[in-house]
């Protein structure tokens, strides 16, 4: 739920900016995989990964603050793992005087903190990827990495019309608000069912408009010679810097995992 | 431009699992399943829609994303929202809905970090595939019973949409439990309970949308029903999904010997058993996978898929056989 989609950092001269988008996507995924594979409690590895993220943030000019601020969104989901300190068996750290003696175990706390760290640094890497790579490049990279063309095309169309339809939703919401008078002391707004129905009809009306818009778009594409195939220009070629970046980062991740599992 | 992004804030914390909360093997299983189903969905929709596939599904994906921001106040600052899987499936058919929701979840994960990258496989399964198929199947099943009445539409829509959210929530709880992030006896009631309420919002908005579409362009609903193909095909897929999910939980199976083995042990003739002269997956394990649990799970999943594949082939073969005069 990130409201910040700035493209102010997407053009730049740093080493990371100049990497082929395919390399950036692959390295982001490998980063998340490395974090995921790190065993519980290996906090040194997480520190190394965090340092890597900060290095990229500084190199690209995006800055540490940007990444830290955006990554705060991970916190609410931590509630899903909140029971770990209380349920994982092991050496007991403390006992709370509620619920007949709730115990907090050390392995549980380690597990909980590990999950939070994994989530947090993975999020930061994803934030960086999007900050320094234009969306068109990311979509092209997915296609170049052999994701099926129809799927990438669908996502591209979705991205293209996202803002148009979001505009329509904002208009719908504003129109509803303009017709929703309230007066202090008077109960207003109708029943929940009624409100749900109103929202539903807004969604339904938008759906019909979107459907018919898609038909107009399809006809426009046909009129311009659309045959079902979408061609794209090659946006980037692999260069030596890409291979160097891939090799060094891969070595870095493998070393971390090696250290994690064999020591 | 930033107003558009404000819409993202209006959405509730839903079923998007971030990275780190699923163990690596679980996340990979999710990706494998998602890839299989997406590939199948691509083929199905290409056959049904032809060239319209890309513009129609792309704009519908944008619609779902935008529609998720349509809310209505419930009580005390909370609001009801739309996830959209059931609605998309009822109007477009389940396979198209899978692609639409995949696009939505994919973009949400990539651009807005709403859901992790490794966890995206299961996010697509939970919020795209399971919601779409549950909504579609339940809706059409109820409509078959109630016929063309408008009350039937309302009931079918409410139950279909509500169940779709619940199924997604249950699946999410199961994945968190298998990953060791949250014990099942806590996560399941919590997820089921919270989403029972969220499901009401989903149900109301879905039904509102359906009644509007039914009164203005009922032909779309008819198309959506047909787009699912034979209801039996959707049942087959649903059944396979359930079998695979159960297969993933095979690790929880009891290790105690079954009836025959126990009797043989008690009466002393267990040692007379001969080993098979060849083994492929000995004792439900995959020889080269070291992790015992993962090995067991993969073996059962493999077995499930093999049985499914053989059943499909046999079924096709039987269908092709000429009826005896």
Image (cartoon, coloured by chain):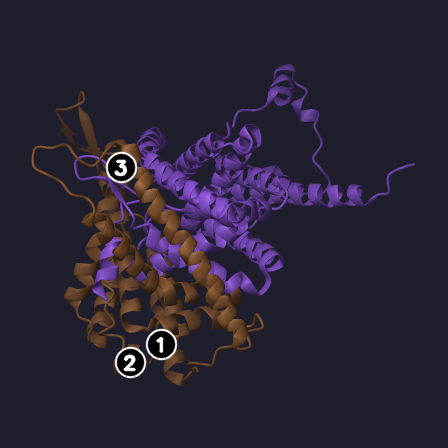
Asked if residue A199 lies left or right of residue B52, the reply is left
In the image, residue A94 lies at what x, y percent? 15, 32
Q: Nearer the viewer, residue A5 or A69?
A: A5
Q: Are marks 3 and 2 on the same chain?
A: yes
Q: Could you tell me which residue is drawn at 61 percent across and 19 percent down?
A: B259
In the image, residue B256 lies at what x, y percent? 53, 24
Q: Which residue is mark 1?
A: A245
Q: Which residue is mark 3?
A: A84
Front of the two marks 1 and 2: 2
Front of the two marks 3 and 2: 2
In which quadrant of the rendered view does residue B310 lie?
top right
- Does residue B289 appear in the picture of this structure? no
Q: Earlier in the sequence, mark 3 or mark 2?
A: 2
Q: Which residue is mark 2?
A: A15
Q: Could you tell me which residue is drawn at 41 percent across and 69 percent down?
A: A139
Q: CA distance from mark 3 to mark 2?
A: 41 Å
Asked if residue B50 lies left or right of residue A183, the reply is right
Q: Nearer the viewer, residue B165 or B57?
A: B57
User: Label 3 lies in what chain?
Assistant: A
In the image, residue B288 lies at what x, y percent? 55, 50
**Can you say whether B185 is above or below B90 in the image?**
above
Q: Residue furthest right?
A: B325
Q: CA distance from mark 3 to mark 1?
A: 38 Å
Q: Which chain is purple?
A: B
Q: Earlier in the sequence, mark 1 or mark 2?
A: 2
Q: Which chain is brown?
A: A
Total numbered labels: 3
- Does residue B231 appear in the picture of this structure? yes
Q: Could you tell me which residue is drawn at 49 percent across and 62 percent down?
A: A215
Disc 1, disc 2: CB below 8 Å?
yes
- The quadrant of the picture occupied by the C terminus of chain A is bottom left
């Amino acid at each position: 739920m990130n409201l910040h989609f700035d493209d102010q950092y997407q053009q730049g001269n740093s080493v990371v900016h100049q990497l082929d988008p395919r390399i950036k996507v692959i390295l982001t995924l490998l980063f998340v995989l490395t974090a995921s594979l790190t065993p519980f409690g290996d906090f040194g590895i997480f520190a190394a990964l965090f340092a890597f993220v900060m290095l990229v943030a500084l190199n690209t000019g995006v800055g540490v603050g940007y990444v830290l601020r955006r990554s705060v969104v991970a916190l609410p989901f931590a509630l899903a793992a909140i029971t770990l300190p209380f349920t994982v068996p092991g050496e007991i750290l403390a006992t709370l005087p509620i619920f007949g003696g709730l115990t907090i175990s050390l392995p549980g706390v380690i597990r909980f903190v590990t999950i939070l760290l994994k989530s947090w640094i993975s999020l930061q890497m994803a934030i960086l990827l999007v900050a320094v790579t234009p969306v068109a490049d990311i979509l092209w990279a997915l296609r170049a990495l052999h994701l099926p063309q129809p799927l990438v095309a669908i996502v591209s169309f979705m991205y293209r019309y996202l803002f148009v339809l979001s505009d329509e939703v904002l208009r719908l919401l504003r129109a509803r608000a303009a017709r929703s008078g309230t007066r202090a002391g008077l109960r207003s707004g109708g029943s929940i069912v009624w409100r749900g129905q109103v929202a539903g009809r807004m969604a339904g009306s938008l759906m019909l408009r979107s459907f018919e818009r898609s038909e107009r778009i399809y006809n426009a594409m046909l009129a311009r010679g659309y045959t079902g195939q979408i061609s794209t220009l090659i946006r980037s070629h692999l260069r030596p810097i890409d291979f160097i970046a891939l090799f060094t980062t891969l070595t870095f991740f493998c070393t971390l995992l090696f250290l994690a599992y064999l020591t | 431009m930033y107003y558009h992004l404000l819409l993202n804030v209006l959405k509730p914390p839903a079923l998007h699992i971030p990275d780190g909360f699923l163990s690596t093997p679980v996340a990979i299983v999710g990706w494998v399943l998602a890839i299989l189903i997406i590939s199948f969905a691509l083929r199905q929709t290409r056959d049904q829609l032809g060239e319209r596939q890309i513009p129609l599904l792309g704009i519908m994906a944008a619609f779902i994303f935008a529609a998720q921001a349509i809310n209505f106040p419930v009580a005390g600052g909370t609001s009801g929202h739309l996830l959209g899987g059931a609605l998309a499936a009822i109007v477009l058919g389940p396979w198209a809905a899978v692609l639409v929701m995949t696009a939505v979840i994919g973009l949400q994960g990539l651009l807005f970090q709403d859901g992790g990258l490794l966890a995206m496989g299961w996010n697509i399964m939970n919020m795209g595939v399971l919601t779409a198929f549950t909504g579609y199947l339940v809706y059409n099943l109820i409509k078959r019973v109630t016929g063309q009445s408008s009350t039937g539409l309302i009931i079918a829509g409410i139950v279909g949409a509500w169940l779709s959210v619940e199924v997604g929530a249950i699946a999410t709880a199961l994945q968190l439990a298998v990953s060791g992030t949250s014990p099942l006896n806590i996560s399941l009631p919590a997820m089921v309970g919270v989403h029972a309420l969220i499901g009401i919002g989903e149900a109301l908005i879905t039904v509102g949308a359906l009644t509007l579409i039914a009164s203005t362009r009922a032909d779309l609903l008819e198309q959506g029903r047909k787009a699912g193909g034979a209801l039996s095909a959707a049942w087959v897929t649903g059944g396979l999904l359930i079998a695979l999910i159960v297969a993933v939980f095979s690790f929880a199976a009891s290790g105690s010997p079954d009836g025959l083995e126990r009797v043989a042990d008690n009466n002393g003739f267990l040692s007379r058993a001969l080993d098979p002269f060849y083994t492929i997956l000995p004792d439900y394990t995959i020889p080269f996978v070291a992790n015992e649990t993962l090995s067991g799970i993969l073996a059962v999943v493999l077995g499930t898929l093999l049985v499914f594949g053989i059943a499909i082939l046999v079924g096709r073969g039987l269908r092709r056989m000429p009826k005896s005069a």
